[in-house]
Image (cartoon, rainbow, N blue to C red):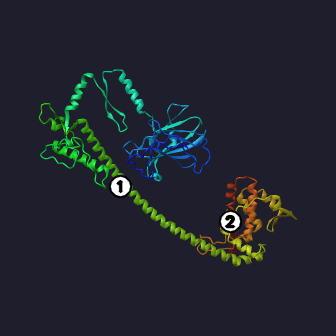
Amino acid sequence: MAERSLTAPEAGNDMGNDDAIGGNVSKYMVLPSGYCGQPKKGHLIFDACFESGNLGRVDQVSEFEYDLFIRPDTCNPRFRVWFNFTVENVEESQRVIFNIVNFSKTKSLYRDGMAPMVKSTSRPKWQRLPPKNVYYYRCPDHRKNYVMSFAFCFDREDDTYQFAYCYPYTYTRFQHYLDSLQKRNMDYFFREQLGQSVQQRQLDLLTITNPEDKSDLENSVMQKKIKIPKLSLNHIEEDGEVKDYGEEDLQLRHIKRPEGRKPSEGTHKSIEAVVARLEKQNGLSLGHSTCPEEVFVEASPGTEDMDSLEDGVVPRALYEELLRNYQQQQEEMRHLQQELERTRRQLVQQAKKLKEYGALVSEMKELRDLNRRLQDVLLLRLGSGPAIDLEKVKSECLEPEPELRSTFSEEANTSSYYPAPAPVMDKYILDNGKVHLGSGIWVDEEKWHQLQVTQGDSKYTKNLAVMIWGTDVLKNRSVTGVATKKKKDAIPKPPLSPHKLSIVRECLYDRIAQETVDETEIAQRLSKVNKYICEKIMDINKSCKNEERREAKYNLQ
C-alpha cells in the first residue's frame, strides 16, 4: 500500500489537531477494513501529487462510498474549495460515491446545476458529470461543513480518471502564455516582476496601455498619494500633524497580540482607526465620495517636508481597496450575525420539540407496559376458566388441557404465524366421504371440493371457518377473546380454538403455495386470516340480528 506524502500540517488549520491534514496524497491505495490479502482490482489508488492537485485525506465509509478531505488554501486555512485528484486501479462497471466533506463555502454554483469535471487517459478532454448525480448540502455528521457528493461509474479498467472542481489552469501554463506574449515584443504589453510568493514563485506585474501614455501613468500613480496615519493604536496624532516615529517605524510594525485575543481583532480595530482618522482629517465618509483635490495632494520635489510626508502616504488605488475591503467585512459581519440569530432560534425550537418528544416516548412506553400486563391477565383468565370447559363440553378440542393453555398465550401474535410447507396428499386423507384436515378435524368431501374452486382468499377462509366451526359456534366466539374497544360495556367472548386456527392457516398456505413462491407475498396474505374470520363472525351476528328483527316484527303484526 502506497504511503501518504509526509509534509507538515497546514499552520492554523481550523479542523482540529485530530483531523489535521498534511500534504497531498501520493499513490494512496484504500483497502477495506480488516483486509489482509494482496491488493486487487477495485482497490482504488488516489493521487494528488501534481501541479494544481489537492486531496489531503481519504476515508472509506463502505464498499462503494469514500469521504475525501481537501487541503486549505496557502496561509488561509479557512478557505477550502479547490480539489483536483486522480483515481486508478479501478474495476470495470465499478460504482462509487465520493463525498468532499470539508467545503467552506456556504453558497456554491453546485446548487444551481454546476458539476465537477472528469477526464481519463483514453478520453483526455474535460467533461462535466451529469448534474443529477451531484448533491451539495450541509452535513451534521461532518461538523456542519458543506458536503458535495457525486456518484460515478468507472467503465474501463486500464484508464486513470481525474476529477477537478472546474477546468484546471496551472501556474506553469500561465507562465508559458506570458512568455509567448513577451516574445511578440508588443509595444502596448509590459511585463515586470513585482515580487515572489510564499512558495518562491514569481509574481508578475502586467501593464497594457499605449506606449506614449506609460510614463504619464507611472507619474500619476506615484504622485497622487494620500496621507494616512500608521496602522497602530499606540500613537495618536495631535493638531492634524503626522508624528514622526523615526527610521525604526518606517515599515508596518507588528504589534504583539495579547493572550486570549482573536487574530482578527487587531486588524479590524486598526482599519476602523484608520478610517475614523481619515474622516476626521479630510472630512471623508464611507457613504459619500469627495473630490480628488480635497483628498489627494501632489508632492513636489522641492518641498522641504517631502521626506516626512513619504512615511505616511499610500497610492490612491491602495486606499480605495482598503475602503472596499472594510465595507465588505462589515457586510459579512452583518450577514453572520443574522445567520447566528436565525440558527439560535432554530435550536431553541428544536430543543422544545425534543423535550416534548421525550415526554411522549416515556408515556408511550408506560402505556405499552400496561397494555402488555392487561393482555397477560386476560389471557390467563380466559385460558383457565370457561373457555376450557366449553371446549370440553362441545368436544372441539382433542388435545390435552396443558397444551391448550399454552396455546392461548400465543393468540395475541397469531397474525405472524407462518407454517412450514408439507406435501398436500399426505395431509388430506379421504375416508367414507370425509376429508381429514389434521388434528382430528373432518369435513364433508363434497363441500371440500366446492371450497377448492372458491375464488379469493377472503371467501375461501370464511367458508372454511364455517365448515370447521359452524355458524352457531362462530356467532358466540371471537378470534382473540378480547373485548372490542368500540363499546364501553362490551363483554369478551371465548376465543376460537388455536389448533383449529392453525388448520385454517395451513389450508390457506397450501392454496397460496400453488399460486406463488414469493415468501413475502405468502406471509402478507396469511396475515389476513384473523381479519377474514372476524368479518365472517360480524356477518353472522348481523344476519342473526336482522332475523330477530323480522321475527319480532312478524309477531307484532
Give how far across and how far down residue 197 sits, in percent. 35, 37
Residue plotted at (53% across, 46% down): 66
User: Where 518 sits versus 489, above or below?
Assistant: above
SS of the residue at dot 1? helix
Q: In this view, does 285 lie to the left or right of 90?
A: left
**Disc 1 to disc 2, C-alpha distance:** 54 Å
Give how far across and how far down residue 554 sits, in percent. 70, 72
Give the camera-side residue of 107 and 192.
192
Q: Quadrant of the C terminus?
A: bottom right
Give the camera-side residue of 461 and 218.
218
Does residue 294 show up? no
Residue plotted at (73% across, 65% down): 502
Q: Quadrant of the N terminus?
A: top right
Question: Which residue is tagged 1?
Answer: 341
Residue plotted at (61% across, 42% down): 40
Total labels: the figure holds 2
Question: Which residue is tagged 2?
Answer: 414
User: Where 383 sits versus 508, above or below?
Assistant: below
Q: In which quarter of the image is residue 158?
A: top right
Give the camera-side residue of 307 and 405.
307
SS of the residue at dot 2? helix
How busy is the neighbourhood of tag 1: few (under 14 within 10 Å), some, or many (20 plus)?
Answer: few
Q: Which amino acid does label 1 sit on?
A: Glu
Give how far across and how far down residue 437 sits, in percent. 80, 64
Q: Which label sits in the foreground, 1 or 2?
A: 1
Contact (CB < 8 A) between labels 1 and 2? no
Give how far across and how far down residue 124 sits, in percent. 52, 31
Q: Which mark is residue 173?
A: none
